[in-house]
Amino acid sequence: MTNPKTAPGPFQTWHLQSGDPYELSRGHAIYAAPTGHDGAGPNLRGGLVLDTDPLAPAVGVDAGLALSPNTMRAPDLAVGLGPERPGWGTTAPPLAVEYASVGQDEDELRQKIAELHAAGTRWVWVVRLVGPRRVEVHEKGQPVSVVGSGQSLIAPGVLRNAVAIEALYDREAAHEAALRNLLQRQGYESLDDVRTKSREEGREEGREEGREEGREEGREEGREEGARSVLRATVEARGWALSPEQRSRVEACRDVAQLTMWTVRVVTAATVDDVFG
């Protein structure tokens, strides 16, 4: 007798519509439950960190991927979806992330990882939210490895930066990593790098003025303009546009600390209006 668990099921990917709470594994429907409270935030934070990496392709959340006519998977995070268009994706992402919490079906998770690997995914990172926080690295063709607290993950050719595992679930760590990524996209390595370059610009302007007053004024103007440039670049990286009033506030601001605070808010806020109140 044919084993019902291994025999193909009756469903095809075209049977599913966007929003249906199911994935498919060889024609078998698999219920995809809503994300629990302890996983909702980490999903968002991990997506923010991975999507802002300077090298990473676009990241999708719960994106339906038709891996074959009767298999459709939706990783919690998929890094590299291919061109965005209506319907299911057909490109297996090079990197996928799954968050595993209470009630995780381990057999189903192993099957999902195997199907992603078979379709071309190189890495599946499983973030364990129960017990000591850790990430299981399932690299295609390699033994499973476990990365613990204080350690980092790498995905050569997909991500530029190593990802501290805390950045995949901890809010502060995620914001810090995302800000670093956005600054790198604009040619800065960190906020310290912005401050250093601003001081250098100020000193150069001061030398050209040839007077102590000119040097001090140049340093301050350099710091201000450096912080203002990072703010503009970060807003642009989020795909936002400042209103005329917001633009005027930015240009009129002479407080480096305030400009820096706005930049951090751009990374974490939902809309540009949340940044400026």
Image: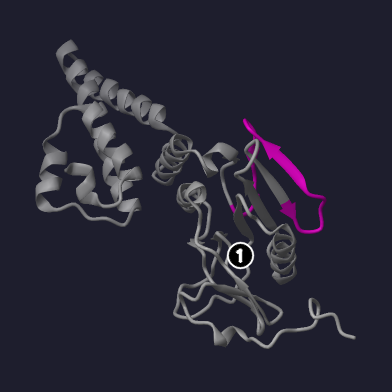
Residue 54 x %, y %: 49, 49
Say which residue label 1 marks: 93
126 in the magenta segment: no
* Residue 186 in the figure: left or right of residue 94: left
| Residue drawn 27% across the image and 55% down it | 240
Query: Along the horizontal axis of the image, is 18 left or right of 203?
Result: right
Report the coloring of the rendering. one colour
- Residue positioned most to the right: 1
Residue situated furthest top in the rendering: 212
Whether 7 is drawn above or below 255: the answer is below
The image position of residue 146, as x and y in percent, is: 73, 42
Residue at 65% from the left image edge and 85% from the top image edge: 69
- Image location (x, y in percent) of residue 76: 55, 59
Which quadrant of the structure image shows residue 224?
Answer: top left
User: What residue span does the magenta drawing correspond to?
Assistant: 138-158
Residue 150 part of the magenta-drawn span: yes
Q: What residue type is labelled 1?
A: Pro
SS class of the residue under badge 1? loop
On the question of residue 89 being in view, the answer is yes
186 on left or right of 277: right
